[in-house]
Image (spheres, helix red, strand yellow):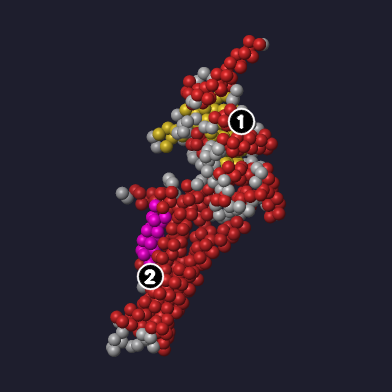
Amino acid sequence: MIQVKSLYKSFEDKDVLLDINATFNQGKTNLIIGQSGSGKTVFIKCLVGLLKPTKGQILYDNRDFLSMSKNEKKLLRREMGMIFQSAALFDSLSVLENVMFPLDMFSSDTLRDRTRRAQFCLDRVNLLDAQNKFPGEISGGMQKRVAIARAIALNPKYLFCDEPNSGLDPKTSLLIDELIHDITTEYDMTTIINTHDMNSVMGIGESIIYIYQGRKEWEGTKDEIFTATNKRLNDFIFASDLLKKVRNEEINDISANDVDL
Amino acid sequence: MILKPISTFGQYIILMGRTFSRPDRMRMFFKQYLNEMVSLGINSIGIVLLISFFIGAVITIQIKLNIQSPWMPRFVVGYTTREIMLLEFSSSIMCLILAGKVGSNIASEIGTMRVTQQIDALEIMGVNPANYLIFPKIIALMTVIPFLVIFSIFAGIIGAFFTCWFGGILNVEDLEYGLQYSFQEWFIWCSFIKSIFFAFIIASVSAYFGYNIEGGSIAVGKASTDSVVMSSVLILFSDLVLTQLLMG
């Protein structure tokens, strides 16, 4: 579980995050949604320590991340996995070597065991056949799957995904979402996903927080989002006619069920 | 005006502080170290040999045409060619050339890794990116550069002989005598010492520019150019200081 308490972040005189309080539960896919420029990426970067918050607390299973020493942070980071918007695979390494990289760095297993583990992770994302290819030789969706395999290689407790579906077609996006959701349940991880993909919200949004101009505006689940009264959230989520229609149908269904009862 | 260079220097020192720490995994360090020796050193042998060969030949011709006279001994061409190759070309000028080839390579490689979030990925894994990426490059270049100096000196001398064998502008015996005349072993060591300093400048300055990129592909190009300019200026400046210290 990750708890965030009164988190602030500003760059010089510009406030980007203002008093964020949130709890991200273990074994669930926790989504952070919001418009571009709302502060989602800054928030996730603060969570993983790529940016230092101005003030506040980040607790990883009650361990205060911000007051940890350099070495303690280093050890905690070995419990984290991250999937970047651009996949961030190492160009000079093959797919297998990319997945083996965290194992090579931190595992004391033999080469055989490390290779076996990396191949297991690649098999989990259905990419064992591509193990000898280089990142430049595979598609964007496959790169994201390799990034997932690399992220789970060390059995992390916390998984962070920064817009994992960006640049992918709807079908591949769905596949990535399902994979992240399945892996979260399988490994009982605390997963935090930054997204503005509505399919992800409707599909895997077990816990959602909505950020607007650096402030948390709303918190709930994918089911609660249909009946949310927050105008900004509704404007953001149900921006298209199609989604408005889906929402109306959903509300009608809920009303009909209430009448039946 | 004055704050920016001070802040840049401060950032450079902080980066070097992060770079020169104990590697997380020695096995990975040695793997990277060997890869970098191949990529930065062995892959530069061709250009070093080519340029040194022609410069050696041209120096011989220029000295013969412009300096030699009936009042000068005939071996002066070989002697001057050797001193120029040994003291300046094979260490300083060759390192300026390598600042262009190797320096831009380092800056653009690390810069691209920054832009594509590969450095962030390393950081999140708990790896010290500066140590993992920059340290092997610095050590590898400092290891291979004395060998490149030796190759350069030999290629230059072969170039000088080439002008005698095929150009016929000088007697081979005179060139040979000049090359051996009043030889001081210390000059070779001076070349090695200077080149090792220059290798550190090339690798660390280029890595600094690549590591601190903010932006996209244009920033990568700018960092690459800036790294070559800054490395070249620092090489020239430290050449002055080192020459005075070692020879003065």
Residue A194 visible within the image: yes
Point out the image quarter for the C terminus of chain A: top right
Q: Which mark is residue B52?
A: none
Chain ID, mark 1: A
* Residue depicted at 39% across the width and 34% down the height: A13
Camera-nearest residue between B21 and B216 = B216
Label 2: few (<14), some (14–19) or many (≥20) C-alpha neighbours in 10 Å: some
Camera-nearest residue between A256 and B219 = A256
Question: Alpha carbon of mark 2 to alpha carbon of mark 1: how far?
Answer: 67 Å
Q: Dividing the picture into quarters, in which one does residue A70 lie?
A: top right
| Residue at mark 1 | A204
* Residue depicted at 56% across the width and 35% down the height: A170
| Residue at mark 2 | B243
- Vertical comparison of B67 with B103: above or below: below
Q: Which region of the structure is painted magenta?
A: B222-239
* Residue depicted at 38% across the width and 83% down the height: B167
**In magenta segment, residue B223:** yes
**In magenta segment, residue B38:** no
Q: Residue A200's spot in the image, x, y percent? A: 57, 31
B111 horizontally vs A168: left or right: left
